[in-house]
Amino acid sequence: MNRGELPRDAIDILRNPSQRTRGPRRATFKQRLIAALIDLVIMAPALLSVVPVWMSSPTEPGKCTDSLGRRIDCQVLTDGGVQAVFITFIIAVGIMATYSALMTVKRGATVGQRYVGIFVVDGETLDPVPLGKAYGRFFGRIPGTVLCGIGLFWMLWDDHRETWEDQMTNTRVLQR
């Protein structure tokens, strides 16, 4: 299999005229949820790298507000500490985005997606997803994840079983 090509069985599903009448099957919610959890475990070390930077960043005396709204003395991060945490967070997100995008472009699926037997294609051509759309899928996942996962749950009532990132980037996630 060459770089950027879909697996032979996936091409057969998409291109075989006898199967075209029933069409390729869309991935189920269960498959996508399990794939997302597997990929989260793989990407977690990058995101967790922020914690030691945060914990070891310099602090200075400051004022904070407690749960009752009272101003109290506390320790706050210095400007340099905030910058270090922010830069580490940006690098971690970049690593996670690159993992997701490169796996989608080169293999048609991330490790989690491959494990559950699903793959991603361009919604118009059914060809492998180009790099820009693969990055778009990752960053398109963020709003739906921040809003209590509604972006993933959206597929439960969408006629085409599409999540927000699928709709934003015009991609499809299909079963092998």
Image (cartoon, rainbow, N blue to C red):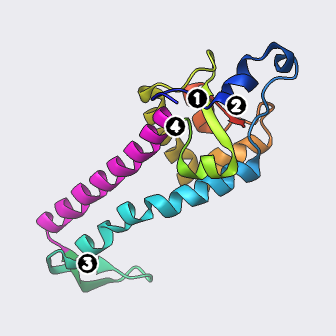
Q: Residues within 10 Å of mark 2 (few under 14, many from 20)?
A: few
Tell me how far mark 3 sits from mark 2, CA to CA.
Answer: 48 Å
Was residue 88 drawn as part of the magenta stretch in this picture?
Answer: yes
Residue bounds of the magenta highlight: 77-106
Please tell me which of labels 2 and 4 falls first in the chain: 2
Query: Alpha-carbon neighbours of circle 3 within 10 Å: few (<14), some, or many (≥20)?
Result: few
* Residue to which mark 3 is pinned: 55
Above or below — where is 133 with respect to 27?
above
Residue most toward the bottom?
A: 73
Residue 20's image quarter? top right
x and y percentages locating residue 75 in the rendered image: 21, 82
Three-letter amino acid code at disc 4? Answer: Arg
Kind of element beneath mark 2 = helix
Residue to which mark 4 is pinned: 107
Q: Nearer the viewer, residue 166 or 173?
A: 173
Q: If you read the primary sequence from the N terminus, does the residue marked by circle 3 or circle 2 appear first?
A: 2
Relative side of 133 to 91, left or right: right
The residue depicted at 58 percent of the width and 46 percent of the height is: 144
Tag 3: amino acid: Met
| First reached walking from the N terminus: tag 4 or tag 1 | 1
Q: Distance between the residues labelled 3 and 4?
A: 37 Å
